[in-house]
Image (cartoon, rainbow, N blue to C red):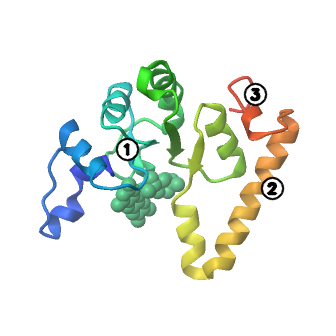
Amino acid sequence: MDIDGAGSVNFTLAGKPVVRKTIDDIKELKRSTSLPFMVKGIMCEDDALAALETGADIIGISNHGGRVLDSTPGVADVLPNIVKTIRNSKKGKKVVITADGGVRTGFDVVKMLALGADHVLTGRPIVREAVPHGAEGVRSLIDYMRSDIEKAMIMTSCNTLEDINSDIQLM
Ligand SMILES: Cc1cc2nc3c(=O)[nH]c(=O)nc-3n(C[C@H](O)[C@H](O)[C@H](O)COP(=O)(O)O)c2cc1C
């Protein structure tokens, strides 16, 4: 559930006006599927708590790559406090937290993990490889990111992904 769809001009132009949803509306969507349910587009602590209230399995901290609302902060800036709020709340101990927006290299992946994300997503770099180069392009991008992740982990003495935390020095 992409909560920033509420501001979508594209849907409106296509004759599908969008409206803001209540927590109960989103709970209804969650109940309608047995698939893992993700609420994506969370950028503040209050919204993270509201997403937990809906029963979401995954909380996506995302500003949609800065494409939806101009002048929103960067995800890396808001991530640590949102993660802290989620983990300190009763319903948020086990929820999966993802982060995306501006992730371009394996070093960026490690930074987002260090700031508290469980998983890190990337959007446009994948599209830019997939369209001209297909699966081979996507594979080489992922290999490139993986190799930078490994380099960053060696340099920060992290043997496993779980060792990556806010103590490592990457800006
Ligand atoms: C062309 C395009 C369309 C997108 N459409 C959606 C969408 O419909 N719903 C959504 O949640 N995110 C959408 N996104 C945002 C991505 O899911 C993701 O959050 C964003 O691309 C991450 O930032 P990055 O591209 O800097 O990696 C879209 C992104 C692009 C580039």
Indicate the amino acid at tag 2.
Ser
**In the rendered image, which residue does mark 2 sit on?**
147
Labelled pair 1, 3 in contact (Cβ < 8 Å): no
Residue at disc 3, secondary structure: loop
Identify which residue is drawn at 58% across, 81% down.
132
Q: Mark 1 to mark 3: distance in Å?
A: 27 Å
* Quadrant assignment for ligand 1: bottom left
Please report whichever mark, 2 or 1, sits nearer to the chain's N-terminal start: 1
Q: Mark 2 to mark 1: distance in Å?
A: 29 Å
Mark sitting on residue 168? 3
Q: Residues within 10 Å of mark 2 (few under 14, many from 20)?
A: some
Residue at disc 2, secondary structure: helix
Classify mark 1 as within 8 Å of ligand 1 or not, answering yes or no: yes
Residue 137 position (above or below residue 118) = below
Indicate the amino acid at tag 1.
Gly
Q: Residues within 10 Å of mark 1 (few under 14, many from 20)?
A: many
**In the rendered image, which residue does mark 1 sit on?**
41
Q: On the picture, is 90 further left or further right than 125?
A: left
Q: Mark 3 to mark 2: distance in Å?
A: 18 Å
Residue 157 position (above or below residue 119) = above
Answer whether residue 22 is visible to the viewer in this image.
no
Q: On the picture, is 8 further left or further right than 91?
A: left
Quadrant of residue 130 in the image?
Answer: bottom right
